[in-house]
Amino acid sequence: MELMQLRMLLAAADGKSLQRAGQTVGRTPQAVGMAMDKLEHELGVSLFEASTGKGLQLTAAGEVLADYARRSLALLEEALAAVEDIRSARSGCLRIGANQSIGEYVLPRITDAFRRMYPAIKLKVTIDYSDSVLASLARNEVDIALVANAPKGKGLNSTLLMMDRVVAVMSPRHRLAKRAQLGIADLASESLILLGEASELHERIVETFRRFQIPMNASVVTSTLESIKRMVAQNIGIGIVPRLCVGQEAASDGLAVRTIAEFGEDRELWMVYPRSLSPASQALTLIVEDMYRAKNATIAQERSVPGTPNSTRLEVAVGRG
């Protein structure tokens, strides 16, 4: 049984003749008649009977088959329309994986812009450590990854979104809060609050302390950046976090933010995606790249104004992973 046979069946039932059925489906009356004969032979029943003055009439078996054929063809059209919506980025599901700093402090702006343009596309967001997010991308469990450090995988495209740096956060009551900038040696005897050991951030901090041969006292290791900030506000210790997660609200949150001389502005934040993209994924990559181009233009304009502090650097660069 073929779809065209079902369409011919319905056309013959509606038109009451092979002639009108052929006109409806773009076939000759002979072709329609042969297709109906073949369908009746396959099913072992008669589907039509001739009625004087009324043309072709469906038999009881023909009525049943025609009813199912209408529903089946309507469902097929619905399925094709749904696939077209996905193909044209009008619907579907987009899976985004992000590390904590991007997922909690950048992704909300990205998803807001995306949802305003593509409200029918569902978003599924997973926040984890960068290595775990990239592993999920490799297993096709997420469509786009937003992570720290450049990926090293074949078949991947990557866009450098921005450069971040690691900073110290502390209670304004802490004695080091009086300093404009810290050195890593200033932290040698301090109780530090760090993100989990599996994180790229933890590895970066440990490696830097080791490189400068400074002892490190990680008195608290936690799984979220927000918990670090809350413990710091209670003066439990000094947190070392991405600058991205502490903004202008730091003072109102009871935090003092200080740069650490040995931690430069060298923490790369990337958008990583397969070379073959769905329309929804492609739409998101374009939105993100446009957002950061706009940020670059704003920062370049600010830098051209005398006296503007050079405190942030955002870059967009498309590369191959």
Image: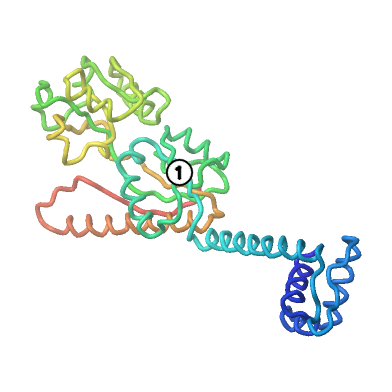
Position of 213 relative to 18 (above/below): above
Q: Residues within 10 Å of mark 1 (few under 14, many from 20)?
A: few
For the N terminus, the quadrant is: bottom right
108 or 320: nearer the eye?
A: 108
Give the x, y percent position of residue 110.
35, 50
Give residue 227's quadrant in the image.
Answer: top left
Residue at the front extreme, as displayed: 52
Q: Residue at the location (27% across, 21% down)?
A: 193
Depth check: 148 or 87 in front? 87
Give the residue displayed 25% in from the left and 31% down from the top. 262
User: Picture coordinates of residue 161 (x, y %)?
Assistant: 36, 49
Count of picture labels: 1
Identified by mark 1, the residue type is Lys
Color encoding of the figure:
rainbow
Q: Nearer the viewer, residue 142 or 62?
A: 62
Q: Quadrant of residue 187?
A: top left
In this rendering, would 199 be left or right of 217?
right
Tell me the quarter of the picture where residue 235 sits.
top left
Q: Residue at x 10, y 21 (%)?
A: 175
- Position of residue 58 in the picture relative to residue 155 (left or right): right
**According to the image, label 1 marks what residue?**
124
Seen at 20% across and 17% down, the residue is: 236
Image height of 10 relative to 253, above or below: below
Is 262 left, or right, of 285 in this rendering?
left
For numbered disc 1, what is the local secondary structure? strand
In the picture provided, is 44 more to the left or to the right than 246? right
Spot occupied by residue 26 in the image (x, y as percentages of width and height): 74, 81
